[in-house]
Image: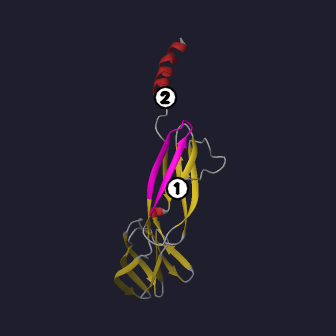
Amino acid sequence: MRAHLLYPLAFVLVSCARPDTAPPEIGLVEPLGGAVAPGRTLSAEGYAFDPSGVVSVRVGGQEVLPPGEEGKRLVRFRFRLQAPTSGRVELLLEAEDARGERGERRVSLVLDASPPRIVVERLEREGNLYRVYGRVEDNVLVDWVVVQTGGRFDPLSLPKEATVAFSAEVPAGAVLLAVDAAGNRASRRIP
């Protein structure tokens, strides 16, 4: 009787198992927003996934799959690249699974030489403190904004977008620091 009860379950499980006919998925997680400062060495990180196991990952034709990762379903990889001084860099990411299926993805990186711009729209003084209202703009993506007071750094909780609005309460002499996705920096002293 028990075998009879398990038969429908086994049928459902077998019918749900599908052969792996799709190529591996591949992508980059770093650099954030695809922005790179020109002329700098780029450190990039990505992943590849396939149910039958990933056996090869290439970037621009060079193998980047770390030793010991071959055959795993989800692999992470890293590589370094020297960015040119201007324009766009297009990378060809390729992955191959254990069944010989190949997947590829083209990724464009923007060479960003411009630092973010800190715009103070309103400044209110109350005693020894200033309330600062403004925005940070970048041609690609603002990564983070902090307030530096002496040797202390207080990050502002802001989204990662091309333009972010902020408000902060800071003492006189504090510095607003903004960094974009390519690592370019800007600062502005208050007041």
Which label belongs to residue 17?
2
| Disc 1 target residue | 60
Note whether 119 is above or below 181 in the view shown: below
Locate residue 190, reporting x and y percent. Answer: 43, 86
Q: Residue at x 39, y 86 (%)?
A: 126
Which label belongs to residue 140?
none
Q: Residue at x 53, y 51 (%)?
A: 47
In the rendered structure, which disc, 1 or 2, sits on the residue that comes first in sequence? Answer: 2
Magenta span main SS: strand
> Which residue type does callout 2 highlight?
Ala
Label 2 Cα neighbours within 10 Å, binned few <14 / some 14-19 / many ≥20:
few
Helix, strand or loop status at disc 2: loop
Q: Tell me where residue 40 sits by quadrant.
A: bottom right
Locate residue 72, reporting x and y percent. Answer: 60, 42
Residue 97 among magenta residues = yes
Note whether 179 is above or below 16 in the view shown: below
Note whether 78 is above or below 55 in the view shown: below
Q: What stretch is highlighted in magenta?
A: 89-107
- Left or right: where 33 falls relative to 71: left
Marks 1 and 2 sit apart, C-alpha to C-alpha, by 34 Å
* 94 and 130: which is toward the camera: 94
Residue lying at the far front in this picture: please name it: 61
